[in-house]
Every structure is written in C-alpha cells, then in structure tokens.
Image (tube, helix red, strand yellow):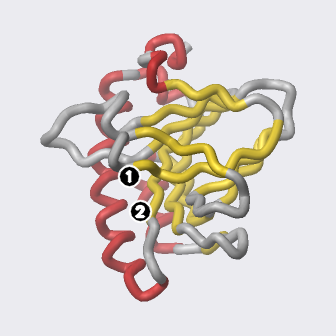
Amino acid sequence: MIVDLLNKKCHYPLAKGEYYIYDDEANHTPKFVNDDEEWNIKIVNNSNFDIDFFQNDGCLMTQNELKKCDWISIFRNKFYFIEAKDVKAGQRKKQRKDAIEKFNATIPYYLETYPALIDLSLYVIMNFRDKVKLTRAANKAKAFYFKEEFNAEYIETNHLDFK
C-alpha cells in the first residue's frame, strides 16, 4: 500500500474526530488548532479507520525546483492533493493560478513515483481559508481540466468529511 512507502516523519494519522488544520509554512508542518483559532481546513473523520494525512511540501517532496501542494491525504481507495490558501476573496484568482501550478507539478510526480495511484480515486482540493464558515464552491472549468488531465475530481472547499 502506498502509505507504507511514504516517509513516516511526515505522517499525521487522524483518528475519529474533528481536526482544524492550519498551514505552518515556516516549519513545513500542519498546525492542529482549535476551531476558534485560524485554520485552513476542517477534516471530520466519522469512520472507525484512521485518515492518513501527510505534510507534502517540505517533507514528502523536498525538491527545490518543483512547486508542491501543501498536504496529501489517503483514505481507503481515495487519494487527496490539498493546497491551502490564506487569502482574501479579491486575491483568489492569483492564488488559484499558483495552486494549479503546484498541482500540475505534484500530481505527475506522484503518478510517476507511485504507479499504484492509478488504481485510486484522485481528488484535488483547493482550499481557501474562511474561519467564519465552511465553504464549498464549484469551478467547472478547473473541474473539467483536472478530470481530463489526471482523471481527478476538483473541489474548492475548506471542509472534508470522511465516513
């Protein structure tokens, strides 16, 4: 299984419960916080299985020449590429473009390095922080692009729920 091939020092297993995670860019680690603090993404594990959550940028992928998404997550037969952005609404277009570049470098790296990914369902999660509410948006053009390019589902959200 792919989890066994990844660096364990980058691994944060998420047992049943709710997790609020903030991207600590300075230390290349996910920062687990309370819901009243700044957070990028809320992950809810409603299952009896751990979610395999990994720091990707600066831990699994350390190549300076490649752009990298922040985190990856694996749950059952699903593989998630997650990019966290902490921006105001007016800056989202520029940050979305940067995130797309990161996904376009990260996903081929994983597909080449771990060919078994082809057997998993791939998800691309574009995450814009909104401390006040849970968000989910549709971007049909990006969804079409990632489906055609990588056979991956594209979702803009700050909330992932695993059952």
The quarter of the displayed image where residue 9 is located: top left
The quarter of the displayed image where residue 158 is located: bottom right
In this view, which residue lies farthest toward the left? 65
Q: Is residue 75 above or below residue 154?
A: above
Q: Residue at x 41, y 62 (%)?
A: 145
Q: Is residue 77 visible?
A: no
Give how far across and how far down residue 83 sits, in percent.
45, 54
Q: Are marks 2 and 1 in contact (CB under 8 Å)?
A: yes
Label 2: few (<14), some (14–19) or many (≥20) C-alpha neighbours in 10 Å: some
Report the side of 137 relative to 140 (left or right): right
Label 1 secondary element: helix
Query: Quadrant location of the N terminus?
Result: top right
Residue on which the image places disc 2 = 145
- Between 7 and 111, the one lying in front of the other is 7
Report the side of 91 relative to 109 (left or right): right
Q: Is residue 110 above or below residue 163?
A: above
Picture disc at residue 149:
1
Give how far across and how far down residue 17 sits, in percent.
82, 39
Report the side of 159 relative to 49 (left or right): left
Q: Residue at x 53, y 74 (%)?
A: 139
Q: Residue at x 76, y 49 (%)?
A: 161
Query: Quadrant location of the C terminus?
Result: top right
Picture disc at residue 132:
none
Give how far across and how far down residue 54 sits, in percent.
50, 32
The quarter of the displayed image where residue 63 is located: top left
Q: Is residue 34 above or below residue 94?
A: above
Label 2 is placed on what type of residue? Tyr
Label 1 is placed on what type of residue? Glu
Give how far across and how far down residue 58 sits, in percent.
31, 36
- Between 148 and 86, the one lying in front of the other is 86
Q: Is residue 63 visible?
A: yes
- Between 127 and 101, the one lying in front of the other is 127
